[in-house]
Amino acid sequence: MIFPTPEEYTVLFLSLKVGLLCVAISLPFAVLLGWVLARKNFRGKLILDGLCHLPLVLPPVVVGYLLLLLLGRRGFLGQILSDWFGMQIAFTWRGAVLAAAVVGFPLMLRSVRLAIESVDPRLERVARTLGANPLRAFFSITLRLATPGVLVGSLLAFARSLGEFGATITFVSNIAGETRTLPLAIFTYINQPDGEAAAARLVLLSIILSLGALIASEAIARKMKN
Amino acid sequence: MLTLCVHRQLAEFSLEIDVTCAYPVTAIFGPSGCGKTTLLNLISGLMRPDSGQISIDDTILFHAEKGIDLPPEKRRIGHVFQDDLLFPHLPVRQNLLYGYQFLASSERKFHPDTIIDLLELNTLLDRLPNLLSGGERQRVALGRAILTSPRLLIMDEPLTALDQELKDRIMPYLRHIRTDLGIPMLYVSHAIGEILQLTGQVIVLNRGQVLAHGDFFSIAHQPKILPLLETHGFENVLPVEVIASNRVQYNNQILHIPPCDRRSGTHIFIGIRANDIILSRQRPAGLSIRNALSGRILDIVETHGRRLVYIDVGKRLAAEVTPEAIEELALKIGDSVICLIKTHAIRIGPDVS
């Protein structure tokens, strides 16, 4: 009764896969944009900053719908991807990853940017005079010192992806085994007669996973302060 | 040989430098905000000149017309900053080896152990920078720059953040680097006493312009240099002969100095601040001051609200005296006076070459 069924395990693994991949594809962009926003001054910086944070305040359903318009079968990018590469994004697990990544991105970016801002920019210049090229100096000094913030950001994005519902169901629907992540599965079970037990088990799993991610992020944040 | 011919517009003035620095050690002296730090950043490639050229020996680091602008990592300039800027996440050893690791073995002029011994860093190697004292941190920063086998070591007021005791402890290390390692140095400071312990070759900079360039003892009395030195703690400079580890001879008069490591018979310069000299009408009795030089007053002037009395003691000495004291002692040009100098107010300078 208390142990999940194979079907529920599929849901759990799909959620984990979506969460990890979402972090993996967001990370390079978050580091790049975090560095640009922390270190560079240029016209339109405020607009870029606003655009990056938009998914944080938009209703997730709107994000999902915009993704559908852009990447759906008739969408501008969706058509190109499907005609040239035969790749389908909408209504697949890849779309679920993308939806989670877009919604979680502002959280990750914010954390990465703050971490980079807290690193003394002169340290990178010293590294240059000591013979490190710009990339090497960035990775061995700035990014290395910002690592705790990057980890915290990744965990936040991961936790956010576990809870992603609105954008996912709008963009990739609720297809068992393909796009049915934890929240979608819980929603489905609740709407089924006799689904309460399964829903309860998944709710418990969700709580454990989310709490674990949050505690880990808090632990890293504390370590960073010392 | 470092050749500089650069122009760069700054917020309040423009930096116009056209000098050639003869080795081994040249000091850049000037008040705060005169463009010293900018100049060093131009040399190490952290800033770009608007026009001009910079070269070391045959290597062109920057040439506006030819479009040459070597990035900092290709210039091989050891840059030591006022703040040590150690990498906080790396233990001392990794900090020291950070630049060393980028060098091909043929480019490595110094073995890390040699530098670690020279700067006495053996016991600190596994510590993180936040567990080091200010003086230790600056020694690590020095070692880190030296281990990149630089063509030139540029130092931006490396001692300013330290207190006097630590300054005195680091100075011998700097003299070791100068004498034993043979790395050319460009040493920036607004403390002439510090500079004179390393070199007599000085470039005087003010508001982006080179006021004078050459041997400190021959430029110090130039009319445009003197006021600058006087407002920043003028150092009187006397050429003396060492006769014991704590005594020197000047014009048949013996002066007691703080213990130094020079051999008897060497000729060195010593520095004395104008406000460390006390004037007296008679040779005093019952005072602990060891040094009394007799001379004749040459001139009494007022600059920037300070009264300076110039006394001929064989060379011109400047003493700072309050207007009240001048009145009370009735000091006049031509009078004989005794200059009293505390032993520990005397700074040991470079050898007379």
Image (tube, coloured by chain):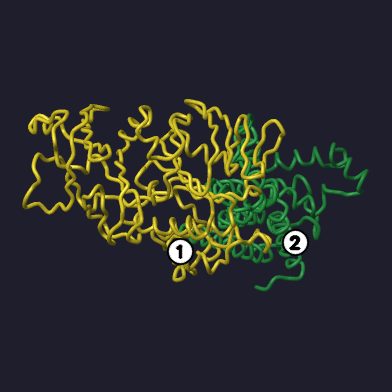
Chain colours: A green, B yellow
Q: Tell me if residue B15 comes above or below residue B107 in the rendering.
A: above
Image point (49%, 69%), residue name? B126
Q: Tell me if residue B226 comes above or below residue B80 in the rendering.
A: above
The percent coordinates of residue B206 (x first, y second) are: 43, 31
Image point (49%, 52%), residue name? B85
Q: Nearer the viewer, mark 2 or mark 1?
A: 1
Q: Which residue is mark 2?
A: A14
Amino acid marked by disc 1:
Leu
Q: Is residue A104 visible?
A: no
Is the residue under label 1 in contact with that under label 2 (CB below 8 Å)? no
- B214 horizontally vs B145: left or right: left
Amino acid marked by disc 2:
Leu
Mark 2 — on which chain does it sit?
A
Q: Which residue is mark 1?
A: B119
Between residue A179 and residue A46, name the one nearer to us.
A46
Quarter of the image with the N terminus of chain A is bottom right
Image point (9%, 51%), residue name? B287
Between residue B334 and residue B36, name the one nearer to us.
B334
Between residue B176 and residue B30, name the one nearer to us.
B176
